[in-house]
């Protein structure tokens, strides 16, 4: 037992430290999203280079997201990991099902980016599932 | 699964946050285990047993 553990409230302080680290991850996620969102809007050139630059931006964003998720994964406990996996699974199944509909509907309804819409619905389903599990306790 | 976690915690006058910190899990995890909404992994069950110096069977009851 360390000197810190001998203290009556060392557990509470450990939780507070963990919460501070999680807040840091959330702040980093927001900062990266803003940087890529705003940067992508103004810095990606138009014309022939646009597709290549968009691909680079998207790759960078995915790499940053993977690093953040890995960091977050280390910080959360087994219950939160299970909830995250449940939410990701439900979002994945939703996207898989909607992809078929979106492809068919895309030919009939004038939707500019059906795949992006499916991705957004998947993200909403994931966030809603996480919130639902949290509220349900 | 039923368990005596809430009683054991109360005996030591620990809050859920204090117990969570000692087990290195979130307060939500402690609450979910206490209310029977989450069955802990074997690793966490052993950690709980070690913290209270009790065997897993003395804390958890699956009947």
Image: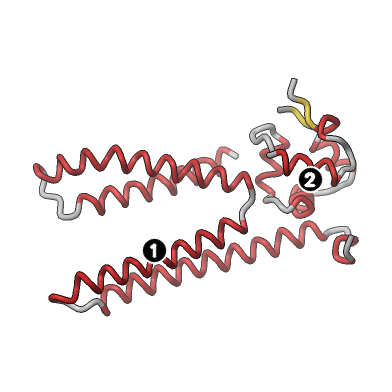
Q: Quadrant of residue A20?
A: bottom right
Q: Considering the numbered disc 1 on the image, is that residue within a helix, a strand or a loop?
A: helix
- Which structural element holds mark 2? helix
Relative to residue B33, is residue A116 drawn left or right?
left
Both on one chain, marks 1 and 2? no
Q: Nearer the viewer, residue A59 or A87?
A: A59
Mark 1 lies on residue: A62
For the N terminus of chain B, give its image quadrant.
top right
The chain containing the residue under callout 2 comes to: B
Q: Nearer the viewer, residue B21 or B11?
A: B21
Q: Which residue is mark 2?
A: B47
Where the C terminus of chain B falls, by quadrant? top right
Q: Residue at x 49, y 65 (%)?
A: A67
The residue drawn where x is 67% and y is 34% is B39
Do callouts 1 and 2 mark residues in contact (Cβ within 8 Å)? no
Query: Residue A120: x, y in percent?
Result: 32, 52
In terms of image quadrants, where is residue A96? top left
Q: At 81% across and 34% down in the image, what residue appears?
A: B56
**C-alpha gap between disc 1 and disc 2:** 36 Å
Where does residue A58 sit, x and y in percent of width and height?
32, 66
- Front residue of A78/B4: it is A78
Query: Badge 2: how crowded within 10 Å, few (<14), some, or many (20+)?
Result: some
Q: Residue at x 83, y 42 (%)?
A: B9
Q: Residue furthest top?
A: B63
Instruction: Quadrant for residue A64, please give it.
Output: bottom left
Q: Residues within 10 Å of mark 1 (few under 14, many from 20)?
A: few
Compared to residue A44, the image places residue B13 above or below, namely above
Q: Position of residue A93 (x, y in %)?
A: 36, 39
Label 1 resides on the chain identified as A
């Amino acid at each position: 037992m360390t000197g810190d553990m001998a203290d009556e409230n060392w557990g509470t302080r450990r939780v507070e430290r963990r919460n501070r680290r999680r807040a840091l991850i959330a702040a980093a996620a927001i900062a990266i999203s803003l940087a890529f969102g705003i940067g992508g809007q103004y810095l990606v050139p138009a014309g022939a280079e646009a597709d290549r630059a968009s691909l680079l931006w998207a790759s960078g964003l995915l790499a940053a997201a993977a690093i953040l998720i890995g960091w977050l994964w280390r910080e959360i406990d087994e219950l939160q990991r299970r909830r995250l996996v449940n939410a990701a699974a439900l979002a994945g199944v939703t996207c898989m099902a909607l992809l078929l509909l979106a492809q068919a509907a895309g030919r009939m309804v004038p939707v500019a980016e059906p795949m992006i819409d499916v991705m957004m619905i998947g993200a909403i389903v994931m966030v809603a599932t996480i919130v639902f599990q949290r509220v349900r306790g | 699964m039923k368990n005596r976690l809430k009683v054991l915690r109360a005996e030591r006058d620990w809050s859920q946050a204090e117990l969570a910190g000692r087990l290195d899990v979130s307060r939500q995890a402690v609450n979910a285990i206490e209310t029977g909404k989450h069955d802990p992994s074997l690793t966490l069950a052993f950690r709980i047993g070690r913290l209270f110096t009790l065997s897993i069977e003395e804390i958890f009851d699956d009947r």
